[in-house]
Amino acid sequence: MTLLLGPPGCGKSTLLLALSGKLSHSLKVAGEITYNGYRLEEFVPQKTSAYISQYDLHTPEMTVREILDFSARFQGIGSRAEIMKEVSRREKQPGIVPDPDIDAYMKNFLLLVILARHSGMYAFGDCNHYLKLFSQAISVIGQESTLQTDYILKILGLDICADTKVGDAIRRGISGGQKKRLTTGEMIVGPAKALFMDEISNGLDSSTTFQIVSCLQHLVHITDATALISLLQPAPETFDLFDDVILLAEGKIVYQGPRTNVCKFFEECGFKCPERKGIADFLQEVISRKDQEQYWYHKQQPYSYVSVDHFIKKFKEHHIGQNLDEELSKPFDKSQSHKDALSFKSYSLSKWELFKACSMRELLLMKRNSFTYVFKSVQLFIIASITMTTFLRTRMVVDVIHSSYFMGSLFYALVILHVDGFPELSMTVSRIAVFYKQRELCFYPAWAYAIPAAILKVPLSLLESFVWTSMTYYAIGYSPEVGRLVAFFVSSNLLSSTPVFCISGYGYGRYDPPRTPIL
């Protein structure tokens, strides 16, 4: 587990994006990035690694538990499923046929113990929590996701708000710190073995940051994962949890090596960290022109500013830097790579499973926004009633004089039915940031998200068209022919355009989160 330190604007986020394969293709990149000897073009880095952004983008209508459940479902369970398969295989060899209830209970217990050992939860003896998890068991496959979600909720301290909606600036929901934890949990709930975390401590107190990093430390050490975590000002106890440190300045690596040797390296350069000073703060200030002088401890020698390039030169001459160059110069033997270490498929689920999962989530969101759809239908009913009395057929005849009234009623219907779809457009645009984030993380392709959203809106569009046509068509006095009636109904259905507005929302350009300018 490596800590990435550096002042704002030094390139921490760019480095993390490059390592996770999410860097913009418009940028020119020099050098090569490999995972177990494989270049980024030879596998799917977005699926192999998990990039956790500093921006908290979540669907406000969903609860914390639902977001983690869907995230676990889209990312899959990785090698955890192999544990259950191995247990089942060993049962079949001697011909053991266990009782179904006992079998589900014991396999749930096995999976829970494995997860608990990974995080150190067994040391606390939280039996009530375990019993609660057991009561949720239905099947082994379903239980894997449930246990995994509850495990993440527990270690991130989100169990107290698990059934609370996330909310946004308008709707009340969880706090900013809880959103930050949810952003972290959304990615570590999956099976990724390479974690790149960008400023995950923003908005969190030092105690919560320590708990999260401590959990990640257990996860990394037990599962042989890799974590590169960017923090601005970690507390001393949080800093001590890391194995290695990468110090970045002006887009260059000043130091990369063991945490225990970083102070000794800078002492050899003439700078010493005071006893009551946090090492993380010292590292960021010693490379600053304004703060560097206070750490100079060769008082008998005159001080002169040591530039970043000079530190880099010193590091390359140091034995840690030489060992690092020697290690990187040796090519990695691909045959030593585990089959589950890298992902060569973009998605964990089949196309049908992706479609079902996205449909279930869209149906859930429609239920959460049911008031909007009911209000739209009632509003359309009232407007149709007013339209019936305004363009009443008993006051109009089919001639040149009254033809403008019929045209006016058609135009009025066009405007009303078209405007009725605008709420769907605003709801779609509000979720577009989450859609782009999850698409880039290879949760699902664009079609798996857009098609279910459009299909599930068709019944609403048909209902609105039926209400308008049945109330206004004969009342206004249009042609009584059945064919004309059907044509009017189909036209109204296309104009009501709830699915059309839904698809139009997905047609917006690429979402770029707001960036704070650095002065």
Image (spheres, helix red, strand yellow):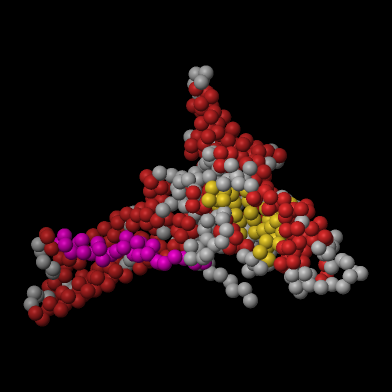
Stretch of the chain drawn in magenta: 485-513
As for residue 502 lying within the magenta part, the answer is yes
Relative image position of residue 444 (x, y in whole percent): 43, 52
How many marks do you count on the picture?
0
Q: Residue 497: which quarter of the image?
A: bottom left
Relative image position of residue 344 (x, y in whole percent): 48, 45
From this viewpoint, which residue is outermost toward the left? 399
Say which residue appears at 27% left-offset and 61% top-offset.
464
> Is residue 204 at least partly visible in the picture?
no
Q: Residue 362: which quarter of the image?
A: bottom left
For residue 207, above or below residue 220: below
Q: Residue 150: which quarter of the image?
A: top right
The C terminus, quarter of image:
bottom right
* Residue sitting nearer the eye, 393 or 478: 478
Say which residue appears at 60% left-offset and 46% top-offset.
331
Say which residue appears at 74% left-offset and 66% top-offset.
310
From this viewpoint, which residue is outermost toward the top? 94
Relative image position of residue 133 (x, y in whole percent): 57, 39
From this viewpoint, which residue is outermost toward the bottom? 401
Q: Answer with left or right where residue 138 lies relative to residue 246.
A: left
- Taken as a whole, is the magenta stretch helix, strand or loop? helix
Relative image position of residue 229 (x, y in whole percent): 64, 56
Say which residue appears at 54% left-offset and 62% top-offset.
29
Q: Answer with left or right where residue 352 lies relative to residue 344.
A: left
As for residue 68 lying within the magenta part, the answer is no
> Is residue 513 at least partly visible in the picture?
yes
* Residue sitting nearer the eye, 403 or 194: 194
* Residue sitting nearer the eye, 287 or 361: 287
Q: Answer with left or right where residue 396 lies relative to residue 460.
A: left
